[in-house]
Amino acid sequence: MPSSFKKNPRNTVRRLPSRGAYDRETIYGILDAGFLCHAGFTVDGQPFVIPTAYGREGDKLFFHGSIKSRMMLELGAQIPVCVTVTLLDGVVLARSAFHHSMNYRSVVLFGQARELVEPEEKDKALYCISEQILPGRWAEVRGPNANELAATSVLEMTIDEASAKIRTGGPKDDQEDYDLPIWAGVLPVQSVYQIPEPDPLLKESLEVSPSVLNAIAKQSG
Amino acid sequence: MPSSFKKNPRNTVRRLPSRGAYDRETIYGILDAGFLCHAGFTVDGQPFVIPTAYGREGDKLFFHGSIKSRMMLELGAQIPVCVTVTLLDGVVLARSAFHHSMNYRSVVLFGQARELVEPEEKDKALYCISEQILPGRWAEVRGPNANELAATSVLEMTIDEASAKIRTGGPKDDQEDYDLPIWAGVLPVQSVYQIPEPDPLLKESLEVSPSVLNAIAKQSG
């Protein structure tokens, strides 16, 4: 597998090209730091953008949903799909309104999805999605039975083209604005797990699962 | 203005319709709790999904970008656009893999965008976006000059159709799974501002701006 995706008209970052990246290490690093994407597809000329969870393995992305879901039905028909993952890292506060910006890591993927039909394939893909969201959870819970697998549509998208766009660091102001008495800097933003809320129907003797404790420990450390 | 958007084939929540909402109060409440959306549009049959900041006023959404931006050029040509805002509130952990879910508030909007050309209109829209991201910041900084306004493309999208989809609360497990010795509940997720990082080029005497302090104070309740 080559280490970078080829630059094509479709995936080339045109605006501020210095922020663009095409290597798998960067792109997969961003994908692996998230689990929520926005999937875009077109039906009769009308674009739809739907948020959904994903799992990644190699150049494949997996999605799941109800077999009744519109997105699953449309995407499973191997139409062009654009999948975008955005991790917001901060609001960049400059001395001028014009130079305000965001720090972020984003990835835009192009490809097509196909529906997985074999129960073993579906099970493996669901495991991948579950591990992406909360590593270790799958092993703690009751796995899907045949009926549940049949009621779940699972899609596999092959990533044909990809690009990342990243901004880091402080504001860049115009030279003459540095003398203005205006505070400037970055207001960092982070997606943070809060204290777990037990199901009211939980048996009192059960302690919070290791997968949950690990996820919380990982973010503070 | 009617209090709800009309349900049409395009915006109707088909999967788990009980999670769908069409009233402006719900939809605008979600929009006003965020400032980052994913805008979807189609060029020659290929969907693109691009993250961007927005501001809302009434039934209008504003976007901005460089006049050289592909998205701005495409969207300004009044093509159909789908704008999605997703606020992730938690990971829902059930006793079975199948019943895992997310708590979220999301909005899907359909409409078209047009480019604003009058400098006063553009300035007003940029103010709206700025206030959406960080209320009060606009008044603290140097506003855009004529050159900056000319270099900025500003789009106004009229929301024609909209729907919200919301999930809250704990897991719903199958009756026979409640006896399993598996911790279940919700792992809440929140987007949290961290400690502001001053620009290294900042004059030492400047204190953090009120807009920043207010945003941090607001999130801690």
Image (cartoon, coloured by chain):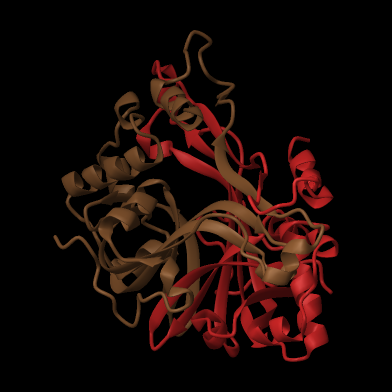
Chain colours: A brown, B red
- Compared with B122, B107 (above or below) is above
Q: Nearer the viewer, residue B4 or A58?
A: A58
Q: How many marks?
A: 0
Q: Nearer the viewer, residue A221 or A72?
A: A221
Seen at 43% across and 79% down, the residue is: A14
Q: Is residue A40 visible?
A: no
Seen at 33% across and 83% down, the residue is: A9
Quarter of the figure with the N terminus of chain A: bottom left
The quadrant holding residue B155 is: bottom right
The quadrant holding residue B190 is: top right
Seen at 77% across and 62% down, the residue is: A179
- Compared with A173, A218 (above or below) is above
Question: How far across and down, in percent of the image, does residue B31 sit?
Answer: 69, 60
> Residue farthest to the left?
A1
> Residue farthest to the top?
A205
Seen at 55% across and 20% down, the residue is: A201
Q: Nearer the viewer, residue B117 or A166?
A: A166
- Compared with B119, B138 (above or below) is above
Left or right: A191 as drawn, with respect to B45: right
Q: Is residue B6 visible?
A: yes
Question: How far across and down, in percent of the image, does residue B194 sit?
Answer: 64, 40
- Compared with A48, B134 (above or below) is above
Question: How far across and down, in percent of the image, does residue B39 sit?
Answer: 54, 71
Question: How far across and down, in percent of the image, does residue B11 sit?
Answer: 58, 70
Left or right: B119 as drawn, with respect to B40: right
